[in-house]
Every structure is written in C-alpha cells, then in structure tokens.
Image (cartoon, coloured by chain):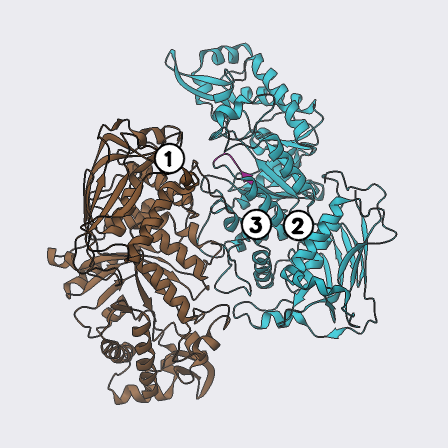
Chain colours: A brown, B cyan
Amino acid sequence: MLKFVSLLLALSCCQGLHHNNIDDYVEAEPVFQASKYGSLWPLPQKVQISEVSFKLSSASFRIVDAKASSAGPSCSLLQSAYRRYYEYMFGSAKKQWGSKNNRRSDPSDLTELQVWITSPDSECDGYPSVTSDESCEYLLFLVHVMFYRSLETFSQLVSEDEYGAKSINATIINDFPRFQHRGILLDSSRHFLPIKVILSNLETMAMNKINVFHWHIVDEQSFPYLSRTFPQLSEQGAYHPYTHVYTPADVKMVIEFARLRGIRVVPEFDTPGHTQSWGKGQKDLLTPCYSGSKPSGSFGPVNPILNTTYDFMAKFFTEISTVFPDGYIHLGGDEVDFTCWKSNPDIQKFMEQQHFGEDYSKLESFYIQKLLDIVASTKKGYLVWQEVFDNGVKLKPDTVVHVWIGGRSDKEMSNVTAAGYTTILSAPWYLDYISYGQDWQKYYKVEPLNFEGTDEQKKLVIGGEACLWGEYVDATNLTPRLWPRASAVAERLWSAKNVTDIDDAFNRLSLHRCRMVERGIPAEPLFSSYCLHEYKGV
Amino acid sequence: MLKFVSLLLALSCCQGLHHNNIDDYVEAEPVFQASKYGSLWPLPQKVQISEVSFKLSSASFRIVDAKASSAGPSCSLLQSAYRRYYEYMFGSAKKQWGSKNNRRSDPSDLTELQVWITSPDSECDGYPSVTSDESCEYLLFLVHVMFYRSLETFSQLVSEDEYGAKSINATIINDFPRFQHRGILLDSSRHFLPIKVILSNLETMAMNKINVFHWHIVDEQSFPYLSRTFPQLSEQGAYHPYTHVYTPADVKMVIEFARLRGIRVVPEFDTPGHTQSWGKGQKDLLTPCYSGSKPSGSFGPVNPILNTTYDFMAKFFTEISTVFPDGYIHLGGDEVDFTCWKSNPDIQKFMEQQHFGEDYSKLESFYIQKLLDIVASTKKGYLVWQEVFDNGVKLKPDTVVHVWIGGRSDKEMSNVTAAGYTTILSAPWYLDYISYGQDWQKYYKVEPLNFEGTDEQKKLVIGGEACLWGEYVDATNLTPRLWPRASAVAERLWSAKNVTDIDDAFNRLSLHRCRMVERGIPAEPLFSSYCLHEYKGV
C-alpha cells in the first residue's frame, strides 16, 4: 500500500497573494453562490482554506518525485497520474510550454508539488484493495496523502481568475473516506457499453473519489464477456459475437485503467437467475421449463440438480478469478423466479429426495451454497444480493451482503448487520430511475447508518453503490444520466456524516460539474446556469 | 414552392431479387419484431412495399436531376440534399468509390434516382413556409414528391443485408402530412446551446420530418441573442457576452441550415413576462418593484405604461422581422406575474386613468395589444401562448394560439377554435418532464383532435410542438433526451389518425432510432436491445 508525503515548495519567498480567487470565480455566476469550500467535491473531512494565495504557472509548475520518496520515475502509476493532473489543471495552457525556460518565477509562484512516498511496500504495480488506505493530510504545503485522492483534491483547489491565471490558496486538509466501499454499478448486458464509455466513466469515478467499479457484465439479455474457457458463451449469447463483446484484452485494459486511478473492478456474474443469455452457448446449463408433461422449449434459471452445472461453474469461476485480480467477485443471486423449476418433473423429484417440500428457496440455497464453496476455493471473497442472505444461505463471515430492495431497506440493514455480515447499500441509489428536477438532492440526503442497530452493527456497513441499470441506458445517454447524480452518492460515502448542508452542496456541486465538463465529461446541469467552458460535443 | 417528380430507373432489366431484406435485418434482433413497414418513420399515409427487391451499389448509384426538371445543378438546396442522402444511405461504403468506372451493373441493380422538379416557381433560394406543400407520391419507381421529405423516405426504404449489401424494395407511396405545423421548441436561455448542438438537432428534425424549429431564444435567465440595434442586451444579459451569444452570423447559419432541410425557424421573444435578462442591458424597460413606498431594487415584467417601452419594441421587432425570414414570430405572453405591477404606484395611477380597476390582466392586454400592432406593422404573423387568448386580447384572424397548459387542454382547444383561431398543441408534449420507462408511448397516444368541436373547429388545429425547456438541459444531455421521444410526436403529427398500433410503432421506432445513431445522433434506446452500429461517442 502506497503512502505519500508530498511537499509543496514555494521556491521563492512566501509572500502570498491576498486575494480570494474562489469568490472571484463565482461572482459571474447568477444562480449558485460561493461556498467557503470552493469547488471541493466530495468535501474533505477537515479543511481550512486560508486567504494566502500562490500563483501556478503552467510554464514552471511541476509535480515531481521527492528525493526521499520510495517510488519514483519507474512507478508508471505515479508518472501517469502526474501527467493527468497537470493536464486537468492547466489544460490548453500547455500551449505556452515552449516558453518554460525563459520564464522567471514570480516571488508568489508555487513552482513544485513534491510527491514523497513513505510506505515501503509500493503499490505501483499492485491493485487497490479493500484495505487500501485512502486517508491523507495536507498541512499548508506539506501534504501527507494516498496520492490518487489527494492529487484530485489538490487540482480542485486550483482556481482560475478572469485572465486565466491559475492560483491555489494555502490550505490545511486532513482527509479520509467515511466508507471504504464507494461503488458504481454499470450494466453492460441490457445494452452493450463500448470500452470508451467505460473508460471515460472510470475517469469520472476518480474525479469523484469513487473506488469500486461494480461491473454487472452479463445478464438475461446478453453475454458480452468473452470467456477463454467457454468462448461459445459470447459467441452465442452476446448481441453480436464481434462487435458486442469484451475480449480478454478489453477486460485487461479496463482493469489497468481503473488500477491507475485507484479503482477496484468487481465483476458480477449473476446466477442462478438472470441467465437467459448463458443458456444460448452452454447446453443443459439452464432448467428446461415444462408445459404439462412436455418441455415447453423455454428455459428457466440455472439447473441446480445436474453435476455438469457445477463442473461448468468451477471451470468458469476459476477463469474469472484469474482474469479479475480483485479480491472479490459479485455472485448475484437476486430475483430467482421459481415458476420454471416448479414445472420441471426432474426438479420435482430432486426436491422430494432432498426433503425440501415445496420450499424452492431451499433449492436456491442448495445451488448458492455449492457455488459459494466453488468460488471460495479460488481464494476470492464474494458479494451477494440480499436475497441470498434472506434465504438463509450459509455464508463465509467475510461475505458482503448487497442491500438493494427499496421500501424498508433500513430493516434489512438491521437484519444483515445483526447477523454479523458486512453490508453495502444500494436501495436508495438506483440511478436508472429518473424524475424531473434536482433528484440528486434525494440521493444526497440518504444517511446509510439510519437504521436500528448497535455501534458494532453500524461498523459492518462498509459503504454503498450507485446503480445505473441498463434497460434505458447505453453509450448515447449513460454519462450525462450518471453525472453529477452519482456525485451526490460519492460525497455521502466519502464526507463526514454532518456534511448535509444542501445549499452548500449545490454551490460546490455546480462548480464540480462544470469542472467535469471542462475535463471533457458531459455531466448534465443541476439547474438553469452555465459553465465558463461549456461542453463542446453534441 | 418546389414540386418534384422523381424517376427511379432500373437501368437494366427489371428482374428484381425476391428476398425481403427488412425481415433479414430484424432477424438478429432479440427484442423488437419486424414491422411490415420496415423502419419507416413517420409512417407515410399510404405504403405498399412489394417483395421485389433491387440492389443499390454505392459505386454506381446516383441521385441526379431529371432532364425535364425545372431545377438542376444550380440549385444548391437540391445538390446538398443529394450528397446528404447519399452519405446517409451508403456511409462509409464510399471507400469503394474509386472502383465506380470499372463496375458493371448487375441486372437487378437500381442505378439512378432521377429527381424531376415540376413546379415552375423553384424554392431553391426561398424559405419553407406554412403553405409549403409536403405531399408526395411514390409509384413503384415513379416518384412525385416534395423532395426533402421524400428523399428521407427513400433512404429509409434502403436496407442492408449481413454482407453490408444495400437494396430497396419496389414500393408505392402516397404521402402527405396530417398537420402542417410540426415543431420542436428548444430553449437557449436557461442554458446556452452551442450552435453545433442546434445544427445537429435540425439535422435530426429533418430525419423525423419535423418542419418547424421554435427557437425560444431568450428568457429570464439569459439573453444570448446579439441584437445589432441593441447590442447591450446580450452584452449585459447573456451568460457571457462572447462565449454565450448568437451573433448575426450564427443566426444566419442556423436559418440557412434549417432552410436546406425544409425547416422553418420561428423565433420567440417572450414579453412582457420572462424578461429579467432584457432588463440588464435596457434601462427602464422593466417595471421597478416597490417595497412599501420605496423601490425594492428588483424588477418585474416589461413596463407597459412608458412610451419608451413601445419605441424600444418597435425598433427591436423591426430588426427581428428582418433577421428572421419566416412569416411568423412567436411573441410569448405567458405567465405574467402581477405582483410587481401591483406594488408600483405609477402603475396603480395608470390603472386608475385607464379604468382597469383591479384587473391587471387588462393591463397585460393593453401591452400585448400595442405589441401586436407593432409586430403586425412589420408584415409578420404571430404566435402567442394561450394566456393571450384567455385574457381576451384582440387578435388578428391569422394569429396562432399555442396551447400549453396541461390538465384540461382539450377544453382550451375547444375554446380557441370556437373563437375561430388557428391553434397548435404542446400541452401533452413537454419533453423536459422525464420519467422512468417508455414515456414515448404516452406522447404517441395523444390525439390532438380529441376535443369537443365541429369539423370546422378541428380544421383550425394546424399541428403541434414538442417542447424541451432548458432548466435541466444543455449540450451534455439535450440530444439523447429529445430523441427518439420527439420522434413519437413527429409521427403523431405526420401520419394518419388511425396509425396507433403501439407494437408496430415500437418495432419501427427501434430501427429508426438505430438509424439516427448510425447517422451520428446519440438518440437514446427505447428499451434493452442493441444497434448493429452503436453510438461511438461518449
């Protein structure tokens, strides 16, 4: 795990500009007001922004490895982050790059951000994990940080005056996320999502300090994952075997792109329901449904009574555990429809043999239990949708239960944590449900720990996820539909519990969304207003 | 007005391919079914698609002027449409262009679409108007058309097999729009819309046979219209005087781009309410509000009691009548809040002098009446929002009343037409209101003539408009939010009254939306599915 101490060196003297650039920037804006926290999003745990301001010149400013740093030029993760954030901060200003050597530093210039990595075990080549430490501390210009997050914060502190001049106020920050699991679910089955869309959303996740990409990669509608072991799954089950699949190289690229931004990629392969597309390429995997005494020709959930099913799952999840480096796999387990199982005489016979009576949730548990054992043998942890817990399946203690059913999700949170399971919350954050107006406020007002339970229970809530299911979403509308609505969730999961001022959030989020737009992300507007630099695309 | 007779010549013999390509195209699609009308949208009034199919080769197929045509190579409107539709039909196939001279035509090839313009008064250099005839007739390969619309229809008949080969089935079409006014309102005041966004939506309007762009160009929030006569209006009232304005050149470009696609540009300058942004650059235009006996510093609607107001309006609308060539201007007149007028002692005095009592709608009418006289003197017709009619303002007989208030808009349609006024309907088509699911069906099911009234009254309904107000919409999300939801309105306003089969509509619209995507428009999906060629942008 990487730890950094970054040192901002004002090379010349420290006579700062006494001038609050954040106020200036906002002055022209007719709708939102200036927040004393500028455009910071999500709000760090502790911030003190002074009025002492330093100028940043694109010609002279550098992000460099500190001499004592344990990681340096060979750490490509670091070097690419430096470039990315330089680009974010100065954008088109790079044009004046040529003049760098001629330029004399102004006494009030801030010329270097030194990144000093203190942890001996460098994460340069590793993957972010559930135990990655994301806490950070800024002291004036002495910065102690987990760098992905703190470079984002640093870049958010840079403001621009009307002449385009960049500056940063001396600032003390002590920061850490309130919840360690801050995720976004994207669904590439209802609609195929081109790699470009996924990457650009990973980019945006990083801007919002989201650290988990929950990739709901396959479902009923299509199976775009190209499996090396079972290539016929996508050959038959994808919308198109060439244009609508994720090749091993694609998946690798997504994982690496995410890694460089401190984002875990947690794939979901949902069974035994939601599997119509699996059945096209894998004979006998799904249960044949019966109409009276004859097979109807349609198929139901995975067939839980055949040994071949478990042979297949063992091979399949062995591949998945190798392809995806994260410690966890999401195994789904939601919304299993029993109608087809009930219709099938072989299943009925099996139910009798197992003494399950008429309780098909016992059959579901039977399947899940065997699946969990298979996956556990690959040394992976797993996440499951809440039904798996509700049905009383025996779970490993480190299983994460994913609460998604609306209505009384607080009850469910109580129950899951009372049983000692770790949990994440999505029920209030189904962003595929859209409505007129500023619905980000609804997402923002959620308090994940608002359920009955002991302090011990509350500690079992490790975070949550915003879910953008794909029935009505594809590359044409995904990004503006997700952002900045998911930003509301991002702040709820990062910032302190008492950060609930909706007006201040509006002011900061308005600027934050314009910043996303400036970085090329078509994040939609909160309300009537404008950005200095509007989105250029269509 | 242009009239065309187009002749499709199968140069060689007429042994067509007996092969239904439309079925083929749909076969791979898991969600929607093949419509017998293929992907036609909006559905023409009469269509008979035969099974005789002709191949179209990008190397040999040409759209050419017929010898007897009254317009030819000098008609840039025609020539640019040929290019556009060639591009739509063959797209990247142009790559094989080089081989054109070597290629021998197949006997089943369709090699030419001859466009034969029959009307003596060519509209090549003119503007589309309310009287433009859009009726068209296809007879096998003898086509009699208003060409903007019929080229679109022709291009929609072209299908592609799995090898990318294009073909078209012999088809008889007799077509005309049910309503002559088929509009879309875009709002460039709540958010500035870059020219690029407007142009690409004009392009999409043409694909949907929408023929009116209602440009709600200014409103409370900002005044992006750069007036030559009153440049201070945008200097002070735009979000930004340089980056968030429409220059005369911009406006000209929008009008010309629309003209080439048979689309009228009807600008709206809404007064006396919705005018906060006007007040910033035009001193004394707005009413000073009072708090007790003193001006509060804030301003209300346009001040209707000053002569300077009418001097300003006369000059302003004289400019507008020159800049916008269409025969109509939309004058707004909606949602006038009387609070500020009531607070102002000068207004109170004026009310007494005029014997208006406490009825401020009389004051509103007083203003509107004078404004209408001013605009009438510029020889323009006008549209007004329904309140102007509701308040009993005397209107010219050719005034178009725009019905927008939801709830009982059928009552309003009855009243407006009973009074003998022409009307257009928007109340059920406020597309800025979004909701989860297939809300296009709601828009599709509207029957504009569903109100009590005589046949004479029904004839006064000349059409309708889909409105996309801008509070929550800018360049980041406008296009996918508008399309294909507005396509539902487009078919309702074009096709026959009995075209109401929602399943058939779904099947055709699914293909129509994929066609828009293929033409580079990020039209959002109707439901889980895919397009052969997905949207490439993000």
Closer to us: B339 or A13: A13
**In front of the other: label 1 or label 3?**
1
Q: Position of residue B66 (x, y in %)?
A: 84, 54
- Indicate the secondary structure of the residue bearing disc 1: loop
Marks 2/3 in contact by CB < 8 Å: the verdict is no
Residue B209 — which label?
A: 2
**Magenta segment, which residues?**
B186-190
Marks 1/3 in contact by CB < 8 Å: the verdict is no
State which tag comes first along the sequence, 2 or 3.
Answer: 2
Kindly identify which residue carries mark 1.
Answer: A102
Same-subunit check for callouts 2 and 3: yes
Same-subunit check for callouts 1 and 2: no
Kindly identify which residue carries mark 3.
Answer: B486
Label 3: how many Cα within 10 Å (few below 14, some 14–19, many 20+): many
Q: Chain of mark 2?
A: B
Instruction: Locate residue B257 relative to residue B193 in the image: left or right.
Output: right
**Quarter of the image holding residue B416?**
top right
Q: Residue at x 51, y 65 (%)?
A: B530
